[in-house]
Amino acid sequence: MEGTVMCTVIAMDHTNLSYRACSVCERTLPDVPNPVCKFCPNYNSGRPPPPPVRFFRLLVSIATDTEVFNVMCFDRAARVLIGCSADEFFDFAKFHPFAAANAGKILEGEMMKMTLSKPKNGNAQHLRAAAVVPLRTGFQPAIKSLRELYKARPGLS
């Protein structure tokens, strides 16, 4: 089902919300200490590699009026739901271990308008959420509710 759909968030897989990537070319890096991108000019230049960044990769179950299915929300779409960068959420979750699970619970039942597209990678299993628009007037991104829940101030974990 490609195109724009009205849907409800049923669940979010909170076990693997993000991945590390090269801050120059945005290619996926291994999740090891101090990863180095082998594809960038910095690799054999003798210069120190730039620090990696995190990007969101959320697997979300949604329901339309006719079916239930999983969609993948990458960084731009996921930031609408979560309300911060993946790096910021990762740092927040280090101090609040159940933040990812609670983010999923916070988003359950939210009505969204999602623009879905087929994946460009032929091996991918799930449709992509190219755009996400919350439909509830008082919608708050998950991080805002999590900060209230954990009594944390913005910018601080």
Image (tube, helix red, strand yellow):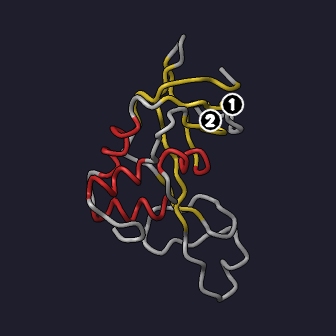
- Considering only order in the chain, which callout, 2 or 1, is on the residue closer to the N terminus? 1
Quarter assignment of residue 49? bottom right
Q: Residue furthest front?
A: 137
- Locate residue 74, reporting x and y percent: 58, 46
* Circle 2 residue: 128
Q: Which mark is residue 118?
A: 1
Q: Residue at x 68, y 81 (%)?
A: 44
| Tally of marks | 2
Q: Residue at x 69, y 65 (%)?
A: 25
- Which quadrant would the N terminus be assigned to in this image? top right
Q: Are marks 1 and 2 in contact (CB under 8 Å)?
A: yes
Q: Is residue 16 left or right of residue 29?
A: left
Q: Which mark is residue 38?
A: none
Is residue 57 placed above or below 36 in the rendered structure? above
**Disc 1 residue type (three-letter):** Lys
- Which quadrant would the C terminus be assigned to in this image? bottom left
Q: Is residue 106 left or right of residue 20?
A: left
Residue in front for this viewpoint, 152 or 130:
152
Is residue 38 placed above or below 3 in the rendered structure? below
Q: Residue at x 35, y 67 (%)?
A: 153
Mark 1 residue element? loop
Mark 2 residue element? strand
Quarter assignment of residue 123? top right
- Locate residue 31, reporting x and y percent: 45, 62
Is residue 63 placed above or below 119 in the rendered structure? above
Q: Residues within 10 Å of mark 2 (few under 14, many from 20)?
A: many
Q: Residue at x 47, y 34 (%)?
A: 60
**Disc 2 residue type (three-letter):** Arg
Q: Is residue 1 left or right of residue 87?
A: right
CA separation in Å, label 1 and label 2: 6 Å
